[in-house]
Amino acid sequence: MTKQEAPRWHRSRQSQDLADMIAICLSDGPRTASQIEEQFLVFGRRLGMFAELHEHEAAARGELTHDVQTDLDKMLQRGWVVRQGELYELTALGRAEAGNKLDGLRKVGTWARRLLRPEAVSQVSLVAHLGLAALKLPAAMMSGSVGLLNDATDTLLDGLSSLLVYAGLRLDKERAVNAVLVLVMLVTGGFTFYEAVRRLFVPFEPDVDGFTFAATIVSALVCAGLWSYQRYVGLRSGSVALITQSV
């Protein structure tokens, strides 16, 4: 197999240093190079990073073996590890480096856990909806598009629903909030239907420009992300209000 045919994993990490991750692997105790390599494979497969191994198993494994050994040699030179036979063990300097890396990972984990709290979803949704409304309302007024105006109004109502969800979660009134959210969706849908039918009898030609299209595209992308975020956390936490809001 030529160099160009190497798995994407290897090409994507050329010139990167695996020393930090190797130090974390060794933080639980001494390991051989092959055991460190196996830790990388297990971690990678959990994240889907080694999906191509079934196609290039021997070549990919050989490249990983080479990379791990190369970085272990660098760590020996830096004084991060010592070698006793086939086993590599962290020095005091290596343990300090591993500790710094683990502290960083713990901070990322704490931040991620906070974002997966239902209250955090409501706060993020509120900020996103207010931002989208500030973008879409001017675009709707400039273009005269009733559809975009209805969408902007709906976005403001979504912001209101975010406030309701947050209040429901804080006050433990999710059932009441869920009923209000359904009512809000019915009112918004009825208003949109009324405007759509009215336009059949009162024709109007909107003046659509690039800003209008940009506002619509940005809105679609942000709302798609919010739907996924709200639904995931709603299902994860069992919050019916969040699942309703995602719809």
Image (cartoon, rainbow, N blue to C red):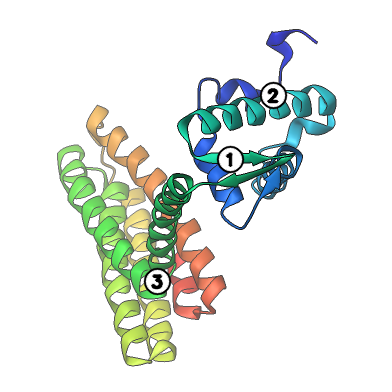
**3 or 2: tag closer to the N-terminus:** 2
Residue 123 quadrant: bottom left
195 sits left or right of 93 in the view: left
Please name the amino acid that badge 3 sits on.
Answer: Met
Q: Mark 3 or mark 2, which is nearer to you?
A: 2
Q: Please name the residue shown 56% across and 24% down the image.
A: 12
Q: Secondary structure at mark 3?
A: helix
**2 or 1: tag closer to the N-terminus:** 2
111 sits left or right of 32 in the view: left
> Residue 242: x and y, percent?
45, 73
Residue 179 quadrant: bottom left
Q: Is residue 226 visible?
A: yes
102 sits left or right of 201 in the view: right
Q: How many marks?
A: 3
Disc 3 to disc 2, how far (Cα)? Answer: 58 Å
Q: Mark 2 or mark 1, which is nearer to you?
A: 1
In this picture, is 246 found above or below 23?
below
Residue bearing mark 1: 82
Q: Mark 1 or mark 3, which is nearer to you?
A: 1
Within 10 Å of disc 3 (Cα), the crowding (few <14, some 14-19, many 20+) is: some
Please name the amino acid that badge 2 sits on.
Answer: His
> Residue 223: x and y, percent?
40, 52
Q: Please name the residue shown 35% across and 60% down the image.
A: 192
Q: Please name the residue shown 54% across and 79% down the image.
A: 238
- Residue 66, numbered label: 2
Please name the amino acid that badge 1 sits on.
Answer: Val
> Residue 30: x and y, percent?
66, 50
In this rendered view, identify the residue nearer to me: 45 or 26. 26
